[in-house]
Image: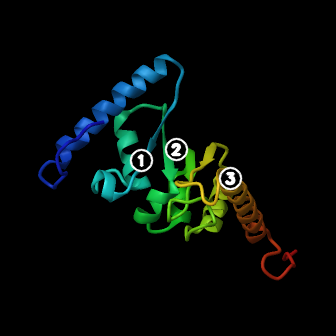
Amino acid sequence: MAIHDNITADNVESCTGVAVDALQHMAKYAKGKGIRLVFEATNHLEMGKFVNTVANHKLLIRKTGMDNIGIQIDWFHANFEELNPYEAVYDAGELLWHMHFRDSNSLTPGYGTVDFKSIMRALKKINYSGFCTIESAPMIPDPDTAARDGIDYLKMMERIAEYQLSAEYPNGYAIP
C-alpha cells in the first residue's frame, strides 16, 4: 500500500479506501495462488498513526471482506503502540497468523523490556498455532548466541506462562 501524505482527520476516509483497495487486490491475487497474507503493524514513527495497532488491523481486514489476510505482530513495533501485550494477542485472536519476537531495543527476546511472559500467556489462552520468528538487529553478540538466547528465553517464558495458567498457581494446590 502506498499512501504518501500525512493521514489526518480530513483524509483518513480516503486513505482507508486506498488501504482496503490495495489489500483486496493483493488478497485476491494471493488467493488465486492458494496463499494467505499477513499484515504487519508498524509503529507511528514509520507509518503515521494509521494502522499501528491490532484493533486497526482487524478493522481494515474486515473491511476488505477477504478471508486470506491475517495479522502479524512484531513486538518491537507493538511495544510502542499497544497498551497491553496480553490484550493485543487476545484481541487479535483467530486473525493472529504470525509474530516477530523482537525486543523493545530491536534485539533478540530477553535483551530488552517487552513482557514476553504475558504474551505467552495470551498465546496459550487463544491456542495459537501460527508461525513466529526471532528477529534481532543487530545479532548481538553474534548470530548463534542471539538465536540461542532468544529461543532459551522464550521457552522459559512459555514454561512460566504454563505455570501461571495452571490451577495450582501460585500456592501449589488446586482447589478440588
Mark positioned earlier in the residue sequence (3 or 1): 1
The answer for how far apart the CA atoms under marks 3 and 2 are is 27 Å
Q: Residue furthest top?
A: 32
Q: Is residue 8 left or right of residue 105?
A: left
Q: Residue furthest bottom?
A: 171
Tell me the residue at 66%/58% (across/down): 125
Q: Residue furthest front?
A: 142
Tell me the residue at 54%/55% (across/down): 138
The three-letter code of the residue at mark 3 reads Ala
- Residues tagged 1 and 2 counted as in contact (Cβ below 8 A): yes
The answer for how far apart the CA atoms under marks 1 and 2 are is 8 Å
Q: Which of the image's four quarters has the N terminus?
A: top left
Tell me the residue at 71%/65% (across/down): 157
User: Picture quarter containing residue 153?
Assistant: bottom right
Q: Which residue is mark 2?
A: 95
Crowd rating for badge 3 (residues with CA inside 10 Å; few <14, some 14–19, many 20+): some
Please name whichever residue, 52 or 134, is drawn nearer the observer in this view of the structure: 134
The residue tagged with tag 1: helix, strand or loop?
A: helix
The three-letter code of the residue at mark 2 reads Leu
Mark positioned earlier in the residue sequence (1 or 2): 1
**88 relative to 35, above or below:** below
Q: Which residue is mark 1?
A: 58
Q: Position of residue 85 (x, y in %)?
A: 53, 64
Tell me the residue at 48%/44% (across/down): 71
